[in-house]
Image: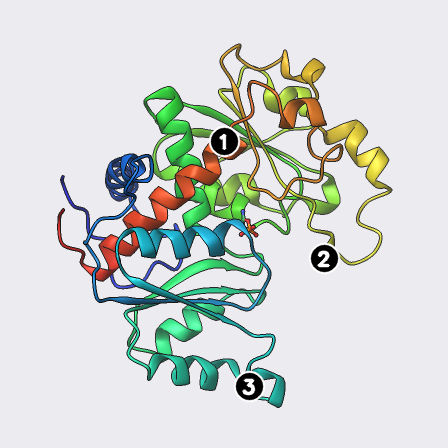
């Protein structure tokens, strides 16, 4: 299996080349098969210890990093801020230094502050993996999204991808826009003007659309984003009903896409808001494929950062 270097940490898609991204996905394709076996374990990272330090809620990312580490035979352990000494006032850095002193081989960090994993990477010797930092980046989500597209279409270059929804608060959108540009795919975005950052087209080389129909016309991939109401100040949206009317993907709207187009969502989905329930559960939805691919991508990232042994 050809190997690709990705450096000491994985803090974002920024700085990864198309070649590096394809290299990670090649490795992940191999790990995908392991998760489909009866015995879902290889000895690649035997004796290594991976800590999941999640300072913000998660189902998919936390569970898949834990399963990824275990399927590579590493010991996986979880830290959650609630119930920890942070409740007694211990800082993020003191907490992370305390955990790292227990001789960890990697720390997977999710935090609601943009830049928290980068700060820890500067202060600690241990490899840091960004599992989502505020509104900034979510690199393993972009990798699993690209893996899902590549497995479906056999390529990434030249794919037309629409990203619809709450772009402003979305680390998923940012990581995907960087990654799609690196691999030569073409991205279009559509969002309420209050949830659309200025300068997006210049920064990421994407097309900014003025209707959902324009955004999804002829695309291979229609990706919708969760409305992140927990990060919004009041008044950014008129109402969920009006948002759904203009932005939600329904079976009627999806006729605009290519016949073979897929629908993606990073989850969790607000059913009836970003996607109609028929689309979530329909034949074009690859939302559960994204979840499955997430384990394989995280196995590949852990393997590369921890210098795993070939099987
Ligand atoms: N997509 C994603 O990051 O989901 P979780 O918040 O459940 O990890």
Q: CA distance from mark 1 to mark 3?
A: 44 Å
Task: Locate residue 222, reporting x and y percent.
Answer: 56, 26
Quarter of the picture holding the N terminus: top left
How many circles with numbers are drawn on the protein? 3
The residue positioned 72% from the left and 57% from the top of the image is: 230
Which of marks 1 and 2 precedes in the sequence? 1
The relative height of residue 79 versus residue 101 in the rendered view (above or below) is above
- Judged from the image, the secondary structure of the residue bearing numbered disc 1 is strand
Instruction: Determine crowd level at label 1: few under 14, some 14-19, many 20+ residues with C-alpha closer than 10 A.
Output: many
Q: Is residue 294 left or right of residue 58?
A: left
Q: Is residue 135 left or right of residue 39?
A: right
Tag 2–tag 3 contact (CB < 8 Å) = no
Display colour scheme: rainbow
Query: Does residue 108 appear to the left or right of 164 in the view shown?
Result: left
- SS type, badge 3: helix
What residue appears at the point 28 percent right and 48 percent down from the top-left corner? 300
Identify the residue at image location x=55%, y=52%: 59
Q: Check residue 230 in the rendering and tell me which mark sits there, or answer none.
A: 2
> For residue 282, what is the image quadrant?
top right
- Outermost front residue: 38
Between the residue at mark 2 and the residue at mark 1, the CA separation in whole angstroms equals 26 Å
Quarter of the view holding residue 74? bottom left
> Label 2 vs label 3: CA separation?
25 Å
Mark nearest the camera among 2 and 1 is 2
Q: Mark 2 vs mark 3: which is more N-terminal? A: 3
The mark nearer the N terminus, 1 or 3, is 3
Asked if residue 208 is positioned above or below residue 160 in the image, the reply reads below
Circle 1 residue: 187
Relative depth, front residue between 271 and 20: 271
Residue marked by disc 3: 85
Q: Residues within 10 Å of mark 2 (few under 14, many from 20)?
A: few
């Amino acid at each position: 299996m050809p190997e690709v270097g990705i450096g000491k940490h994985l803090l974002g898609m920024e700085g990864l080349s198309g070649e590096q991204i394809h290299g990670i996905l090649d490795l992940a394709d191999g790990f995908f098969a392991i998760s489909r076996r009866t015995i879902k374990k290889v000895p690649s990272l035997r004796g290594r210890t991976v800590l999941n330090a999640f300072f913000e809620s998660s189902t998919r990312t936390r569970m898949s990093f834990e399963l990824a580490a275990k399927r590579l035979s590493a010991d996986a352990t979880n830290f959650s801020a609630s119930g920890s000494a942070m409740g007694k006032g211990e800082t993020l850095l003191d907490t992370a230094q305390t955990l790292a002193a227990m001789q960890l081989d990697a720390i997977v960090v999710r935090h609601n502050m943009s830049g928290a994993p980068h700060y820890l990477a500067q202060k600690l010797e241990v490899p840091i993996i960004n599992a989502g930092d505020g509104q900034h980046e979510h690199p393993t989500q972009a990798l699993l999204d690209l893996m899902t597209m590549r497995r479906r279409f056999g390529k990434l270059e030249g794919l037309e991808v629409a990203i619809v929804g709450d772009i402003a608060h979305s680390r998923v959108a940012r990581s995907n826009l960087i990654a799609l540009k690196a691999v030569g795919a073409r991205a279009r975005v559509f969002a309420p003007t209050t949830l659309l950052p200025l300068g997006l087209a210049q920064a990421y080389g994407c097309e900014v659309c003025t209707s959902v129909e324009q955004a999804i016309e002829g695309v291979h991939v229609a990706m919708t984003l969760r409305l992140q109401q927990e990060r919004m100040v009041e008044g950014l949206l008129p109402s969920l009903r009006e948002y759904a009317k203009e932005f939600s993907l329904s079976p009627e709207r999806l006729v605009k896409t290519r016949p073979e187009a897929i629908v993606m969502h990073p989850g969790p989905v607000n059913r009836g808001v970003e996607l109609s329930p028929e689309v979530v559960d329909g034949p074009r939805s690859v939302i559960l494929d994204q979840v499955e691919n997430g384990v394989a991508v995280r196995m590949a990232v852990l393997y590369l950062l921890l210098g795993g042994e070939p099987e």
